[in-house]
Image (cartoon, helix red, strand yellow):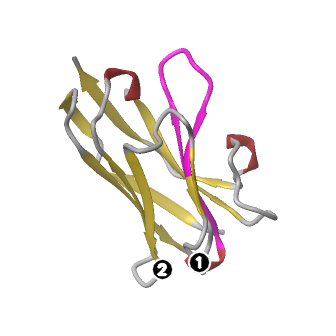
Amino acid sequence: QVHLVESGGGLVQAGASLRLSCAASGSTFSIYDMGWVRQAPGKEREFVSAISSGGGSIYDSDSVKGRFTISRDNAKNTVYLQMNSLKPEDTAVYYCAASLGVGVPTQPYEYNFWGQGTQVTVSS
């Protein structure tokens, strides 16, 4: 079982950038497909981005395409989410998640393991 810890959230103004990190421990990180999922107040969890175990396949939601970039460093057991041109509607708790299923998950329910989340707040 993998343990995930997110960091890097904060309060920023619209147009700013943030980089989220997710450090994994307790299992072999490189076998997991990884993703970022966010949840805004009063809303369902929403898929943001995902990356395959080896990093060769990446999927982004339409709402973040061109602004957010997911990456991973398997030597450091870490996955990142670089967020540029942030908008107020990006405000949410961002969760790192891991999957051992078939194919890279693009739906929140497909992930097996979750971090505790990090808050991102974008002011207008």
Residue shown at 27% from the left, 37% from the top = 85
- Residue 76 colored in magenta in the image: no
Nearer-the-camera pick, 59 or 102: 59
Q: Name the side, left or right, on which 86 lies relative to 68.
A: left
| Residue 121 or residue 56, whichever sits in front | 56
Q: Which residues are magenta?
A: 32-49
* Vertical placement of residue 104 versus 88, above or below: below
The three-letter code of the residue at mark 1 reads Gly
Give the residue furthest to the front: 66
> Looking at the picture, how far across and down is residue 30, in whole percent?
58, 79
**Is the N terminus in the top left, top right, bottom left or bottom right quadrant?**
bottom right
Residue extending furthest bottom? 75
Q: Are marks 1 and 2 in contact (CB under 8 Å)?
A: yes
| Left or right for 18, reference 48 | left
Q: Position of residue 38 (x, y in %)?
A: 51, 36
Residue 54 disc label: 1
Q: Residue at x 48, y 18 (%)?
A: 41
Q: Nearer the viewer, mark 1 or mark 2?
A: 1
| Nearer to me, 49 or 120 | 49
Asked if one can make out residue 35 in the rendered structure from this viewpoint, the answer is no
Helix, strand or loop at label 1? It is: loop
Residue 41 sits inside the magenta stretch: yes
Q: How many marks?
A: 2
10 Å neighbourhood of mark 1: few (<14), some, or many (≥20)? few
Disc 2: which residue: 74
Dot 2 falls on a residue whose secondary structure is loop
Q: CA distance from mark 1 to mark 2?
A: 8 Å
